[in-house]
Amino acid sequence: MNILQQQRCFNFLLTTFVVVFLTTTLSPVSARLFPNVSSIPKWNSSHVPPAGAWNAYLNFTGCSRGKAYDGLSNLKNYFHYFGYIPTAPPSNFTDDFDDELEEAIKTYQKNFNLNITGELDDATMQQIVRPRCGVADVINGTTTMNSGKSNTTSTPKFHTVAHYSFFDGMPRWPEGTEELTYAFDPDNGLDDTVKGVFSNAFKRWAEVTTISFSEASSYAVADIRIGFYSGDHGDGEPFDGVLGTLAHAFSPTNGMFHLDQEEDWVATGDVTQASVSNAVDLESVAVHEIGHLLGLGHSSVEEAIMYPTISAKTRKVELADDDIEGIQVLYGSNPNYTGTPSTSSRENDSSDGVRHVQATWSMLFSCIFLLLGFVLLV
């Protein structure tokens, strides 16, 4: 081996070392793959996580009717987005705490089992800033949450119908549907571990009703199309960043199921022990959104999967009686359902790690440096 060949060999080995080093070092930033707490670099442990998308609303705690508060129009937009203020004004919302906002707050408080005061008290504000599903609680002026209680608000705009709920018109997949197919946006490049999380989520609904689910080979022809996106992604429902709206799905038979790729999605391991403070359990959100895909709306029962909000580092995947009763109204009961979760849908993840689903920059760096190493050898 001459000197030139030795130099090329040395350069390749150096490049390989750099690739391994960068892949190992950068993975917590991009892929969020943390085998255990001790594997997190010190700089990441001390990193201050970004505030939730709505944390600024906490500044309105204690506000009440009859005054104007700088930025209150943003909170009105929040209530409009989730249906509590049915009609937006011709121009922008004002910063006035008016009667319309007070009535929206009362309906919100009723839906979430809070004291109905019409004021932005601490309990109400803490509920508002929790991460949640992007599907509205009030559709076309009708709130279907919390119907088990009488409506004590003075507004005639809202009326309630049931403790579990359906979309307007009670849409469902066609009578006689026995199987629905699903597929993943190929641009996301999801691995089998992540796909398995969605498979488990579908099984939880299949277990209690008459519809089964299978992964399709073609994204274009699948009944249900799943993808991770950020910001404005073309469906009129833009995502808002970390810990705001986590995901949304559309009523039957649309089949679109979108998740915010900016979240710290945990696919495996115990999310409650995740070192990332903004960690969101992927299966918990998937089970909820599949309920929407099948035709269920939101429920005011906090234990139910179809409850609109879920905190970070929380796992909630077991269907509650409220969820089961609602879905069986639409599709009937699985004749094999015994009331006990099967082994396939129970908690059976023994992994110590947590996996964050995101585009991985470390892979990009690896490709670049491997290419560089090849060039140096030529």
Image: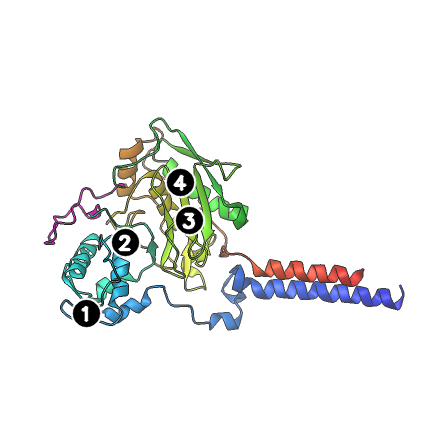
The percent coordinates of residue 322 (x first, y second) are: 26, 42
The percent coordinates of residue 6 (x first, y second) are: 84, 66
From the viewer's side, name the closer residue of 223 and 232: 232
Which image quarter is the C terminus in? bottom right
Query: Which three-letter amino acid code belongs to the residue tagged 1?
Result: Cys
Query: Which three-letter amino acid code belongs to the residue tagged 2?
Result: Phe
Q: Magenta part mainly helix, strand or loop?
A: loop
Compared with residue 63, is residue 359 higher up or lower down, i.e. above or below?
above
Q: Secondary structure at mark 4?
A: loop
Is residue 35 visible to us here?
A: no
Q: CA distance from mark 1 to mark 4?
A: 40 Å
Residue 161: in magenta span: yes
Q: CA distance from mark 3 to mark 2?
A: 17 Å
Compared with residue 136, is residue 36 higher up or lower down, i.e. above or below?
below
Residue 187: in magenta span: no
Q: Secondary structure at mark 3?
A: strand
